[in-house]
Image: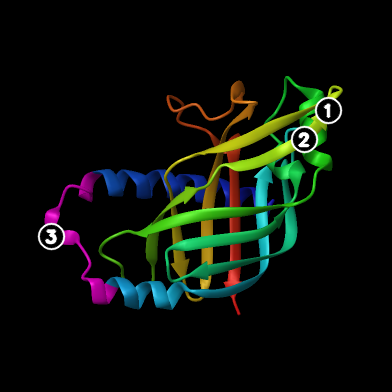
């Protein structure tokens, strides 16, 4: 399917781009001036609508399509280098939890969350593409009730990933890293030694209003 092809292609794009970052990151002449940095953040800032998150859903058993999505999301990019994605459902954030069914169900049934991300512009922007490092902030449920008790539950993310702004659109890869209960690690999802972490990927994109 087109969605699966798109997500697979995007994973490859991220890997290639991160390799480029690794090669160019030590060049001291690549920095942006304060004026240019402000100009580019102003270009990106604003309200984004029609947002979607694509993600692999292992519970879908058909071989032709294992990509699920949530739609009608909105986001705001601020000039202070922050991004806010609103109304992210728990079934997305809990998708990688496999060994703790009650915890997973509690997150799925909890209120939708606001996902906050910090970003840092990548040097050498082009006229068509503007890249930026993305640092999602850990999502925290301060009082989540399951198994007969209240718990503080946190979902962490692998950082940084590399997003792109182009022609009024944003495309942001977000990798689920792990889940913690009352400060204790329950499960880790992202494997830094693996070449394929696509099962942990949430791909968000939206168009500027």
Residue at 56% of width from left, 45% of height from top? 8
Residue 19 falls inside the magenta stretch? no
In the figure, residue 182 lies in which quadrant?
A: top right
Q: Are marks 3 and 2 in contact (CB under 8 Å)?
A: no
Report helix, strand or loop for mark 1.
strand
State the extent of the magenta-drawn residues as a range: 23-36
| Looking at the image, residue 56 lies above or below residue 30 | above
For marks 1 and 2, give the CA distance: 7 Å
Q: Which residue is mark 1?
A: 146
> In the visual, does 25 lie left or right of 178?
left
Residue 30 falls inside the magenta stretch? yes
Picture disc at residue 144: 2
Residue 109: horizontal and vertical position, in percent? 84, 41
> In the visual, does 190 lie left or right of 181?
left
Q: Which residue is mark 3?
A: 29
Residue 192: horizontal and vertical position, in percent? 44, 28
Give the crowd class for mark 3: few <14, some 14-19, many >=20 residues within 10 Å: few
For marks 1 and 3, give the CA distance: 53 Å
């Amino acid at each position: 399917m087109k969605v699966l092809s798109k997500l697979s292609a995007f994973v490859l794009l991220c890997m290639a781009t991160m390799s480029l970052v690794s090669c160019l990151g030590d060049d001291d002449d690549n920095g942006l001036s304060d004026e240019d940095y402000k100009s580019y953040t102003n270009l990106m800032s604003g309200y984004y609508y029609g947002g979607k998150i694509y993600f692999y859903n292992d519970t879908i058993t058909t071989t032709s399509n294992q990509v699920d999505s949530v739609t009608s999301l909105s986001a705001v990019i601020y000039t202070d280098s922050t991004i806010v994605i609103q109304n992210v459902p728990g079934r997305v954030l809990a998708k990688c939890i496999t060994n703790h069914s009650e915890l997973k169900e509690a997150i799925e049934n909890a209120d939708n969350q606001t996902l906050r991300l910090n970003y840092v512009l990548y040097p050498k922007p082009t006229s068509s593409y503007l890249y930026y490092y993305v640092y999602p902030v850990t999502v925290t449920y301060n009082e989540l009730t399951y198994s007969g008790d209240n718990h503080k539950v946190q979902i962490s993310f692998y950082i940084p990933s590399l997003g792109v702004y182009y022609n009024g659109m944003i495309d942001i890869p977000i990798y689920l890293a792990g889940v913690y209960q009352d400060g204790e690690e329950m499960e880790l999802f992202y494997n830094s030694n693996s070449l394929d972490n696509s099962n942990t990927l949430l791909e968000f994109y939206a168009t500027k209003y």
